[in-house]
Image: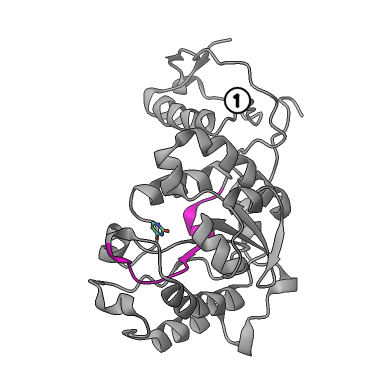
Amino acid sequence: MTTRLNPEVAASVEARLRYYRDLGVHDLYRRGEPVADSDIVEVAAEPQAAEPAQPYVAIPVTESESSDLSSRAARSAAPRDIPRAQALQLLREEIGDCTRCPLAFQGRHNIVFGDGDPHTRLMFVGEGPGADEDAHGLPFVGRAGQLLNNMINAMGLQREQVYIANIVKCRPPQNRTPEPEEASTCSTFLFRQIEIIQPEVIVALGSTAATYLLDPKSKSSLASLRGRIHMAHNSKLIVTYHPAYLLRDPRQKKEAWIDLQIAMRELGLKPAKPAGD
Ligand code: URA
């Protein structure tokens, strides 16, 4: 059957579908809402290769459903009984114009504290700011950030509904991996952010995030840490590829999508419903 949409809607639907296909999601169903006649133009369907069925397929959730990503009553008590946003602000003030590790003296422009909803149930942790993040003072705003936004959208969420932070808050020169001293010094502040936010699920993006969130002494490979739920910092922790790695090797997006579906399942985010259900 041919679907007809107006060109603007069609372009945005096509971009979204292309992204899902990149992730290896081919079985998409739509909710039963009618399409207005005024929305109608022809869109040619692309041929699709046969793929194994996906157990969970992301569909955008409605506002009332997605607000469920904000904290549940059972996890609502922030440390020291002060509002989480305020607790985070106090922590940011405590960090100040930090000189606790060598990264303070290696060309840093901005400390990248973290960004997002302090009441979220889902947190993403990366490695450390790159040039764009250093310039803007916000995590994941460059190319890797665009991909992370797409990954979050594919989960049926908006970036503003999650919290994003890094193992280190200052840019390592030439985007090198943070040294153990830098990561261990700085991650104590990340752990306090986690304590304040109390996310149910943390997604560790890449092996630096996984290592410092799980066990800095461990030599476990990313591959061996993926595909299961770890407990860390009072949260369920899921390990996946770093978006910068996915930009270099887009074939792994399917694997990342499998990891994100573990997070979705733990958060009760909606799996796809067959058409007509
Ligand atoms: N890579 C990261 O690990 N973190 C960022 O904030 C940006 C890129």
For the point 54% across and 11% down, which residue is it?
2
Q: Who's the residue at 50% across and 19% down the image?
A: 37
* Percent position of residue 62, x then y: 60, 46
Q: Judge left or right: residue 190 versus residue 95.
A: right
How are the colours assigned in the image?
Answer: one colour
Apparent side of residue 220 relative to residue 252 in the rendered image (left or right): right
Instruction: Specify start and end residues of the magenta stretch as a single range.
Output: 157-173
- Magenta run includes residue 35: no
Residue 223, x across and y down, in percent? 61, 47
Residue 163 forms part of the magenta stretch: yes
Q: Quadrant of ligand 1?
A: bottom left
Mark 1: which secondary structure?
loop
* 53 left or right of 140 in image: right
* Closest to the observer, 93 or 77: 93
Q: Kindly identify the residue that appears in the image at 34 percent across and 47 percent down.
A: 143
**Residue shown at 25% from the left, 78% from the top:** 105
In the picture, which quadrant includes the C terminus? top right
Total marks in image: 1
Furthest toward the top, the residue is 1
Label 1 neighbour load within 10 Å: few <14, some 14-19, many 20+: some
Vertical position of residue 46 compared to residue 73: above or below = above
Q: Foreground residue, 4 or 48?
A: 48
Q: The N terminus is located in which quarter?
A: top right
Determine if the C-beta at disc 1 is less than 8 A from ligand 1.
no
Residue nearest the observer in this picture, 66 or 33: 66
Give the percent coordinates (x, y) of residue 258.
64, 41
Image quadrant assignment for residue 31: top right
Q: Which residue is mark 1?
A: 26
234 is higher (above) or lower (below) than 17: below
Provide residue 251's location: percent of width, then percent of height.
50, 32
Identity of the amino acid at label 1? His
